[in-house]
Amino acid sequence: MDRLEKLLFGIDRTARLLEVGPSHNPVAPKADGWHSFVLDHASQEDLREKYQGHDVAHERIEPVDFVWTGGPIHDAVPNTLHGSFNACIASHVLEHLPDPIGFFASLDRLLAGDGIVSLAIPDKRFCFDYFRPLTLAPGWIEAFEHKSTRHSRRSTLEAGAYLMSNGDSSAWGQFDKMRVRLRGELEQAKRNADAAGQSDSEAYVDCHAWCFTPSSFELLVLELGSLGLIGFRIGKLFPTEGCEFVVSLRRGRDDHDYAAGIHDRRLQLLEAMVNDLGDQCRRMNQRFRPRIVRRGIGRVKRIIKSAVWSLSPSKHDNHGVGRLKLTHSDSD
């Protein structure tokens, strides 16, 4: 399946779609015959102006039905449309949200009973979040309890200070060579955090507030569902391809929420998270492997040469018995 097929998994053309934050690259554009409604942070005209001078297809920026300027996203949609959408699609949106639990609460209102949530999410192992820690449930819970509309100071500092690239690329794939470059500057990160407001009356500074691998995201959904904070479960999780993974969510809680095995499942996912990070470490170490191999071969050659000379007949033990002779040609 290609990327679009994954994002449209379980969704047919008769569905009423809500696409959140498609910007200049909608997944299910009206122009292609989809019955889509667009929710974004700016109007079509403002988005086209925003991307002037950028190498994007401006003609793909579609009319925006609902302009979201803050607060719960369901407030940007007329009440008459609540519960009318069959699916919501959001590509590379979730990691930017100050309050992801609040986002899912809004979708609970906006989607019909069998509604699908389709998400494309960056895998932190393959993008500029590379050095940042994975998000666990307490971070989302804290943001929800604070009713966050701005990113925390910690998130803004972290996103700026530990920004990295692979060579000149901010995102890459599983088979790309690693050329790690730390681009984050501590002083600049602090200036950005100082400028970021914490209330609706202050300046909004965007960043990736949350970092994921497939296993860590699955754990988030499982744990928050078991606490009754998210009303969705994972229907299908596609493995990471390139810099992202795609997940399709359905209403309801995971079966583990009702069984005694939820503790075991949490442990399995935590172990899988460690394996995800181990895979990241192995990929990074591959860039050193040729040099390590060369050094190892050189060391073996030196040991062999030392052994050859020590076994020469000119060398005698304390009893004057000549040792076995090995010439350089014998050791090849």
Image (cartoon, rainbow, N blue to C red):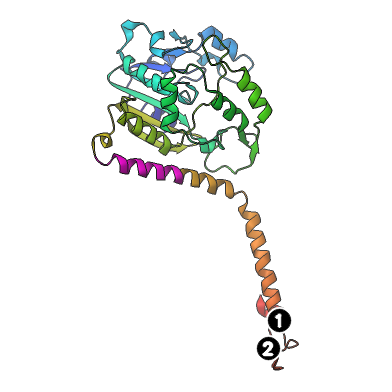
Q: Amino acid at mark 2?
A: Arg
**Residue 277, above or below 77:** below
Find the distance from the CA under tag 1 to the CA under tag 2: 8 Å
Q: Amino acid at mark 1?
A: Ser
Assess whether residue 267 is covered by the magenta stretch: yes
Residue that mark 2 sits on? 323
Q: Is residue 300 left or right of residue 199?
A: right
> Secondary structure under badge 2?
loop
Residue at 32 percent across and 29 percent down: it is 225
Q: Which residues are magenta?
A: 260-275
Q: Is residue 327 visible?
A: no
Badge 1 density bin: few <14, some 14–19, many ≥20, Cα 10 Å = some
> Secondary structure under badge 1?
helix
Residue 207, image x and y in percent? 55, 24
Write down the quadrant of residue 1 in the picture.
top left
Residue that mark 1 sits on? 310
Residue 195, image x and y in percent? 62, 17
Q: Is residue 197 left or right of residue 93?
A: right
* Earlier-in-chain disc, 1 versus 2: 1
Residue at 43 percent across and 33 percent down: it is 136
Assess whether residue 51 is covered by the magenta stretch: no
Residue 12, image x and y in percent? 32, 22
Q: In the rendered structure, are the residues bearing label 1 and label 2 in contact, judged by CB atoms less than 8 Å apart? A: yes
